[in-house]
């Protein structure tokens, strides 16, 4: 097919006052516009694009290198309509970052997460995306378009935290905090498939029940002051001795609260700090050889490994809401703000046999 010279995309606009809950903040607008489609190795017609909390942070102005006029969205899947023979007409997942191919410790080039920022210059909430061939991987056949479109950011972040950093193995006892989040839900799938004994925390009983239904041993409500004791009781109930790792997205006084149930040499991996901008490590943790590890996104190699693992074990992200068309994307931001979704929010941009827009 011929490749268009422009594409319709959800573009980040200027800031103006907006009421969110009981606060009035400066909030970036977003609108569907025609934007130029540059020439590139590969052009992908987007089928589905997934939301992350990152998109809401960008609109709130709480993210680095925000650029008005940029296309939003970091997650997406689509069909290659122009590119090398081995990719042409294949369904692919968009790699949500650039500049990190395979180095185990961190980026090996100019690094950035796509969508809504000055670099890279493209995003997935668009009818078409033009990019390098190394910025796509084949989509797993067992996932729907919606699931593949919600896969990249959560999968690569969870894989690096669970496998590269925490080095989870069969029989390990694991706590995953904030299980309602997209990364945490995928981390749960990885840990269960690896044979770990998983416990979760959430403020929502339904979300804990969902995790238990998938195979978690149990969960605690992190709003209860007693949650560390409740977790210790759950471990005892299952005849398990302490925690070997924590996969955390909140930060805060985590080590002090869990110190008594952390095993010697336990790994605490933090991939976000939504509750507090620090995790204090005191001398008791040092004496127990606790490892506190930061983890951000991951490499293309790690995303490929995560996707191959998902295909082998038939793992897929949970999708709770599908919005039809770029022009109907605005409710996605509102749903993220409310924080009540138990799965990913996805925009269906096009169908396989033609665009809906």
Image (cartoon, rainbow, N blue to C red):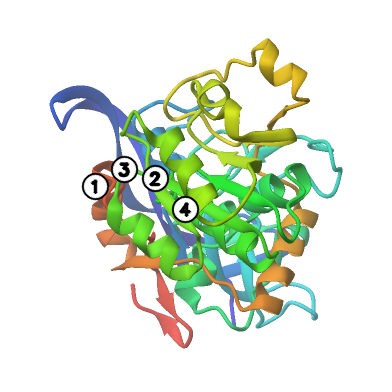
Tag 2 secondary structure: strand
Mark 1 and mark 4 in contact? Answer it, CB < 8 Å. Answer: no
Q: Which residue in the protein does label 1 denote?
A: 334
Q: Earlier in the sequence, mark 3 or mark 4?
A: 4
Say the numbered circle drawn on residue 220: 2
Mark 3 and mark 2 in contact? Answer it, CB < 8 Å. Answer: no
Task: Name the residue nearer the viewer: 116 or 273.
Answer: 273
Say the numbered circle drawn on residue 203: 3
Circle 4 or circle 2, nearest the eye: 2
The residue sitting at 63% across, 42% down in the picture is: 243
Circle 1 or circle 4, nearest the eye: 4
Name of the residue lying farthest toward the top:
283
Tell me if 112 is positioned left or right of 220 in this view.
right
Mark 2 Cα shell of 10 Å, populated few (<14), some (14-19), many (≥20): many
Q: Could you tell me if residue 72 is visible in this image?
A: no
The residue sitting at 48% across, 32% down in the picture is: 250
Q: CA distance from mark 1 to mark 2?
A: 27 Å
Q: Which residue in the protein does label 4 denote?
A: 182
Q: CA distance from mark 4 to mark 2?
A: 18 Å
Tag 4 secondary structure: helix
Q: CA distance from mark 1 to mark 4?
A: 16 Å
Q: Earlier in the sequence, mark 1 or mark 3?
A: 3
Task: Name the residue nearer the viewer: 106 or 295.
Answer: 295
Q: Could you tell me if residue 158 is visible in this image?
A: yes
Tag 1 secondary structure: helix
């Amino acid at each position: 097919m011929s490749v268009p010279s422009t594409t319709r995309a959800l573009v980040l606009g200027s800031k103006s006052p907006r009421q969110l809950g009981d606060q009035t903040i400066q909030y970036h607008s977003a609108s569907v516009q025609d934007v130029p489609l540059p020439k590139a190795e590969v052009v992908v017609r987007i089928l589905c694009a997934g939301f992350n909390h990152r998109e809401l942070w960008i609109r709130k102005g709480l993210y680095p290198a925000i650029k008005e006029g940029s296309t939003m969205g970091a997650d997406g899947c689509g069909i290659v309509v122009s590119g090398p023979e081995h990719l042409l007409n294949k369904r692919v997942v968009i790699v949500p970052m650039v500049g990190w191919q395979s180095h185990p410790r961190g980026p090996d080039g100019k690094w950035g997460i796509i969508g809504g920022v000055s670099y890279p210059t493209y995003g997935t909430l668009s009818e078409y995306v033009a990019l390098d061939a190394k910025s796509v991987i084949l989509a797993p056949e067992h996932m729907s378009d919606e699931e593949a479109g919600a896969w990249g950011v959560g999968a690569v972040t969870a894989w690096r935290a669970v496998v590269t950093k925490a080095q989870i193995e069969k029989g390990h006892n694991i706590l995953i905090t904030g299980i309602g989040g997209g990364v945490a839900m995928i981390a749960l799938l990885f840990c269960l498939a690896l044979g770990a004994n998983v416990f979760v925390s959430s403020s929502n009983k339904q979300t804990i029940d969902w995790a238990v239904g998938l195979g978690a041993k149990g969960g605690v409500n992190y709003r209860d002051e007693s949650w560390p004791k409740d977790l210790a009781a759950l471990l005892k109930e299952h005849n398990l001795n302490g925690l070997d790792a924590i996969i955390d997205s909140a930060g805060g006084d985590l080590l002090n609260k869990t110190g008594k149930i952390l095993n010697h040499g336990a790994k605490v991996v933090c991939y976000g700090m939504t509750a507090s901008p620090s995790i204090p490590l005191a001398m008791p943790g040092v004496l127990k050889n606790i490892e506190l590890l930061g983890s951000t996104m991951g490499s293309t190699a790690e995303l490929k490994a995560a996707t191959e693992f998902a295909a082998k074990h038939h793992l897929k992200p949970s999708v709770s809401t599908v919005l039809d068309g770029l022009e109907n994307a605005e409710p996605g931001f509102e749903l993220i703000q409310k924080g009540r979704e138990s799965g990913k929010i996805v925009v269906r941009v096009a169908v396989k046999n033609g665009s809906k827009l």
